[in-house]
Amino acid sequence: MNITLNQTDGQNASLKVSLQEADYAARVDEQIKEYSKKANIKGFRPGKVPAGLIRKMYGKGILVDSINQILQESVNNYIKDNKLRILGEPLPDRQDENAIDWDTQKEFEFSYSVGLLPEFELPLDQISVDRYKIEVDQTTLDEAYEQMQNQFGQTTNPEVSEATDYLYGELKQTEGGDFNTKTLIPLNKVVAGVEKFVGVKPGDTITFDLREAFGDDNAALAHVTGLSKDVTAGLNGTFEFTVEKINRTEKAELNQEFFDKIFGQGNVTTQEEFDAKVREVITENYEREAENQLDRAIIDQLVDTASIEIPNEFFKRWLAVTNEGKITPEQIDEFYDQYVKELKWSMIRNKVVEENDIKIKNEDVVNSARQKMMAQFNMPEVPEEMEETFNNFLDNHLKQNNGRNFVNEYEALVAERVLEFLKDKITITEKEVTAEEFRNLVGA
């Protein structure tokens, strides 16, 4: 067997494997013996089928399988032994299906395209990001109160609409199309001509310009019509809305019943305690989101700053081959920048792990998944009588999807450890902002 690597440029190479009969004959003979032991052919006792008959009946298939096994093993070993940094795995070069004569040919040559990944340095001294400290101001608290009071309030159906109501009824296009549907219109989303929707009663019909009413916002139009944003982009003209019902939410009162619904029975008993608890929860949520924003900023800057050359042509082909039937070439082109970003971050993450001996043990993965599952079920701890059941449930969860859930948890833990390491090596500036400023920054 002879394996040669021809590097065409810094990112691409061709791997050629030449096989002589001596390279595969012993494996083929071994496979034929195994077939002879298991074959059930009329006229022969089990395990006594002559090897010559097996070779005549199944020899070509056994030859193909044996050579494929040898190719996979030898290519993988070559890459490992030569410490090649490659993208994905080698891709067999396309060849004429009739180019190989499996009946008579004794010597074979196979070639593979290989995408090479470059060595690179981490420009940690160039990375500077902001860590946001969010001030929970009174406006943010008032918004939270309004949301909670509306969520736990009582819905009524008044006879006359007001500006904060929801109108349910039939929406239909009167010119330029035949769109017709039953829908719910939130009046607080109407930005032009809201006076047409206020003071109406069930049975009234409102005529208005749909796009103008919702400020040319395709997301709002999609919500009202139930159509996709792409479809609503072409939706124009005059519409009629016939009111069938008016929905109004009467805000819940700030009393003990309300406190119990939000934080559990008896955990909060006064307005002062409730205010403090709401502020605490909002602060924790913003701190968590601020840390997520910091992580994204670190990843974005590292990916943009690190000099990493990607074998683009090979990468696109590899994406197409490994996702055949799942994504189209057009989708690969559309989202290619995101694929490249994910690849570069994966390379950066692996480099940090390798160079700094970051290790994740199996028990780390299990404990991380356990904590997340306990939080999901709102369990500060697992009761002793439920321990075995909980552990079985956790074990089954990690084994699902052919162990993919375990792999996902492992990769998330690696990313978390890598980001913790990076935060000690880069420049992070603390910056105080209001909740509204932070929402604008992250596009929330």
Image (spheres, rainbow, N blue to C red):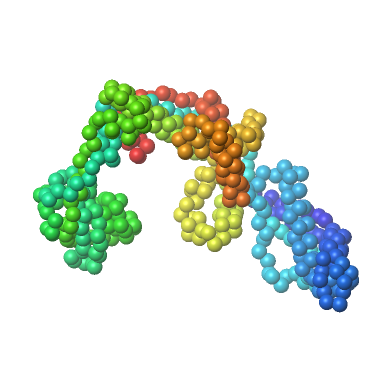
Work out whether 195 lies above or below 363. below
The image quarter in which residue 385 lies? top right
In percent of width and height, residue 104 lies at 82, 72
Q: Position of residue 108 (x, y in %)?
A: 79, 63
Q: Residue furthest bottom?
A: 43
Q: Is residue 301 visible?
A: no
Q: Is residue 107 left or right of residue 213?
A: right
Q: Quadrant of residue 118?
A: top right
- Which quarter of the rendered picture does the C terminus lie within? top left
Q: How many marks?
A: 0
Residue closest to the eye, 239 or 349: 239
Give left or right: position of 50 versus 305.
right
Q: Position of residue 185 (x, y in %)?
A: 22, 52
Q: Residue sitting at 25 percent across and 65 percent down?
A: 179
* Closer to us: 36 or 416: 36
Residue 361's place in the image compared with 280, above or below, is: below
Q: Nearer the viewer, residue 371 or 339?
A: 371
Closer to us: 96 or 382: 382
Q: Is residue 167 left or right of residue 266?
A: left
Query: Left or right: 243 with respect to 403?
Result: left
Quarter holding the N terminus is bottom right
> What residue is shown at x 30% (from left), y 54% (from top)?
222
